[in-house]
Image: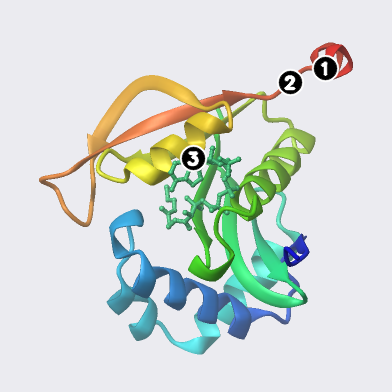
Amino acid sequence: MSPSLTVRRIAADQGAVFRELRTASLREAPYAFGATLEDALSADAASFDAAAVDRAVSLTVATFILYTEGHPAGLIEAHFDDSAARRAFVCELWVAPAVRHLRGGELLVDTAGSWLASEGAMEVYAWVADANRNAMRFYEALGFGPTGEHRRVQRAPEQAESLLVRHVPTTSQVFQQ
Ligand SMILES: CC(C)(COP(=O)(O)OP(=O)(O)OC[C@H]1O[C@@H](n2cnc3c(N)ncnc32)[C@H](O)[C@@H]1OP(=O)(O)O)[C@@H](O)C(=O)NCCC(=O)NCCS
């Protein structure tokens, strides 16, 4: 039987869980993120505690955690940038290998996207490394498409990443489904 997967916004006292998941994701999938494992390991516990407090209640940034049978097994960040357009992004997406292909990633993206939409987003953006073909196919399967915007990967400037976008369905589009 498939394990049951649930997603909840991080709670203010989950700094240690946040640190554990970030470290696990950077160790397991270093190619997928702008930050490095060294960044996470060198940051002190208090910075994760402070981030959890902020991401639990902020109107501009949130972290959502995936649970399998009650155990943390993945995460995603949702945030608005500080440009005039106030673009909405998802990032830091990771699902533990043991529970991949069970729609946990989809649940994380949809939950983060719903939160962004509830805070006013009409589009949700995601930067994906061109070399990360799995993540590209994953986001495409979820309805994200290219914006035509590209940039160098900060951690590895010889590599490129592309900006994808998914439009938030309007109420009338939701009723047509
Ligand atoms: C990308 C990732 C989050 C997907 O998580 P997941 O829980 O396995 O994905 P889901 O089960 O929700 O997949 C939903 C759909 O996406 C597509 N998909 C998911 N993984 C895929 C893969 N490896 N190759 C091709 N398509 C894939 C499929 O269409 C899938 O639907 P299906 O299972 O019915 O075919 C996960 O593989 C991961 O954590 N990878 C390492 C970190 C990473 O790359 N993060 C993204 C940074 S931009």
Q: Secondary structure at mark 1?
A: loop
Instruction: From the image, tell me which residue sits under label 2.
Output: 169
Q: Find out whether the residues at labels 2 and 3 contact each other: C-beta distance under 8 Å.
A: no
Residue 66 location in percent, x, y?
67, 64
The tag on residue 138 is 3
Q: Secondary structure at mark 3?
A: helix
Q: Quadrant of the N terminus?
A: bottom right
Residue 122's place in the image compared with 97, above or below, is above
- Tell whether 163 sits left or right of 47: left
Using the numbered discs, state the Cα–Cα distance from disc 3 to disc 1 in whole angstroms: 21 Å
Residue 135 location in percent, x, y?
42, 44
- Circle 1: residue type: Gln
Q: Quadrant of the C terminus?
A: top right
Q: Give the mark, 1 or 2, whose residue is nearer the N terminus.
A: 2
The tag on residue 177 is 1
Q: Find out whether the residues at labels 1 and 2 contact each other: C-beta distance under 8 Å.
A: yes
Q: Is ligand 1 less than 8 Å from the beta carbon at label 3?
A: yes
Residue ID at (74%, 43%)? 115
